[in-house]
Image (cartoon, rainbow, N blue to C red):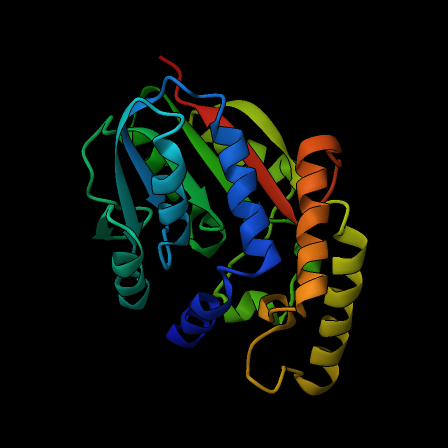
Amino acid sequence: MDDKEIRHMRRVEDDHWWFRAKDEFILHKLIPFKQLSGNVLDMGCGTGRFLHVLETCFSNHFSDYQLFGLDMSDASINYASDHSKALIVKGNAAVTGFADNFFSLVVTSDVLEHLEDDGAGLKEIFRILSPGGYVVVTVPAYQWLWSGHDKALSHKRRYTGTSLSFAMKKSGFALKKLGYYYGILFPLLLVLRSFIIIKEKITAFKEKNGTYIDQVLPPSVINKLLYRVCVFEREFCAVPFGSTVYAVAQKEK
């Protein structure tokens, strides 16, 4: 992801419905591990938004932990250092430099799709996780939704539940949960993304500010409505499709 996209993301992410809903969705997947302690890594921590969320929420749910962030972008690390008190390290997700069995939990949100070899990234997570440790993964769904947005964010691929499950099991993980998110809004997202793809093919279309429609902050009323729909889905209505695939897996003892 280039610095321009990182700067724009930082401007909108704290208020944007998509980022807020994703943060809370991941936390919802972490809460069952209330006895977790030890080192925790946000792999691909970006601007530090989710690190800050973890710092705020972990004290209510986890007994003892040390929080780390990892990113390879200097711009992201600078933002993250201002945003979080976690120990933030520059490094590649496939070669982190951390010791074997160092973490009890790794969260990697929208990172694997950036790697040339996602298997190498997953094997690295497996190596640095302690036996019994967990990883929570999110990735973008469906290769047929590929658009200029993916290019702008330096994506290499999109996933299905089947392909993510296969990659994680191949790397040694025992899969505990697998599914999709943003399912209720998926028809709307599909229409918007289809419009973008068509326009790109004809005119290499972009918004005037050079960012893609996915990262534009909607009007306040719409932003709040979209966020509430995501909360409803998380709490009451799991949908077997969506624009994000997630997995929770364990490195078994």
Residue 97 left/right relative to 216 = left
Please tell me which residue is depicted at 64% across the width and 67% down the height of the picture.
Answer: 147
Name, please, the residue furthest toward the top: 253
Q: Residue at 65% of width from left, 84% of height from top?
A: 204
In percent of width and height, residue 132 lies at 36, 17
Residue plotted at (77% across, 72% down): 195
Quadrant of image for the C terminus: top left
Q: Quadrant of residue 130?
A: top left
Q: Residue at x 81, y 54 (%)?
A: 187
Identify which residue, 97 or 188, lies in the foreground. 188
Question: Residue 252 at what x, y percent from top left?
Answer: 40, 16
Q: Nearer the viewer, residue 140 or 84?
A: 84
The mark total stands at 0
Name the quadrant of the N terminus: bottom left
Percent x, y for residue 190? Answer: 77, 59
Above or below: residue 114 compared with residue 34: below
The reply to whether residue 161 is visible in this rendering is yes
Query: Looking at the picture, does residue 19 appear above or below residue 131?
Result: below
Q: Is residue 113 above or below residue 191?
A: above
In x, y percent, where is residue 47?
Answer: 37, 59
From the viewer's perspective, is 144 left or right of 69? right
Q: Is residue 35 left or right of residue 227?
A: left
Q: Say whether residue 182 is visible.
A: no
